[in-house]
Image: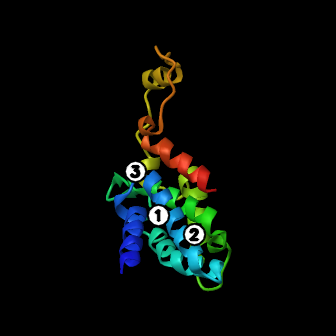
Amino acid sequence: ACEDDLKSELYRLCTSDGTPEQARHAVFTMAALVNEGSKNKVQEKENTFASLLKTLTSSSSLCLSIEGEDNEKIVNVLTTLTAMAESVPTLFMRSEKTDRGGKSIRFALETVLLGHGREKREIDKEPLDANEQMEESIPKRRKTKRRRGPAQLSHTCQRAIAAVDFL
């Protein structure tokens, strides 16, 4: 019962309540729990992570925006998928039953990085007038040369970094 509670808490960190770092650690913890007493570790890991992969590859999880707002959890989803690919790479190999791993890979590449299939409002923003174009083309100097940490990066940058890490 205690192990089931732990697994459900780790699952929740991966799907809804955790930060990307917590989700990553949760995946590795779940994988380590399988390693302890299993004879067929690969199959056991696949069984353990199959429902998590199904949840993460649902249409509500693999989307850039929800009801016009940025999907704040997409970085968490991509980070969790990255950890799963490291722990159980066989989940992302083609399968006759379902190709959820392939679906997630196509989403990261085609939608997140290449921008295919984005919503109309994201693509068709109003064109800039001549003054705005000139202002955007002039590089602005920064007063400090500090590096930005992950928490300071824009959501779009965090999403792109998570997609590259996954691929």
Dot 2 or dot 1: first in sequence order is: 1
Q: Amino acid at mark 1?
A: Leu
Say which residue label 1 marks.
62
The residue tagged with tag 2: helix, strand or loop?
A: helix
* Discs 3, 1 touching: Cβ within 8 Å: no
Q: CA distance from mark 3 to mark 1?
A: 18 Å
Which mark lies nearer to you, 3 or 2? 2
Which residue is more in the foreground, 136 or 109?
Answer: 109
**Is residue 114 visible in the rendered structure shown here?**
no
- The vertical placement of 104 against 64, above or below, is below
Q: Which mark is residue 121?
A: 3
Q: Which residue is mark 2?
A: 103
Q: Residue at x 44, y 72 (%)?
A: 55
Determine the CA span between mark 2 and mark 1.
9 Å
Q: Are circles 2 and 1 on residues that touch, CB within 8 Å?
A: yes
- Determine which quarter of the picture holds residue 126: top left
Dot 2 crowding, Cα within 10 Å, few <14, some 14–19, many 20+: some
In percent of width and height, residue 147 lies at: 51, 27
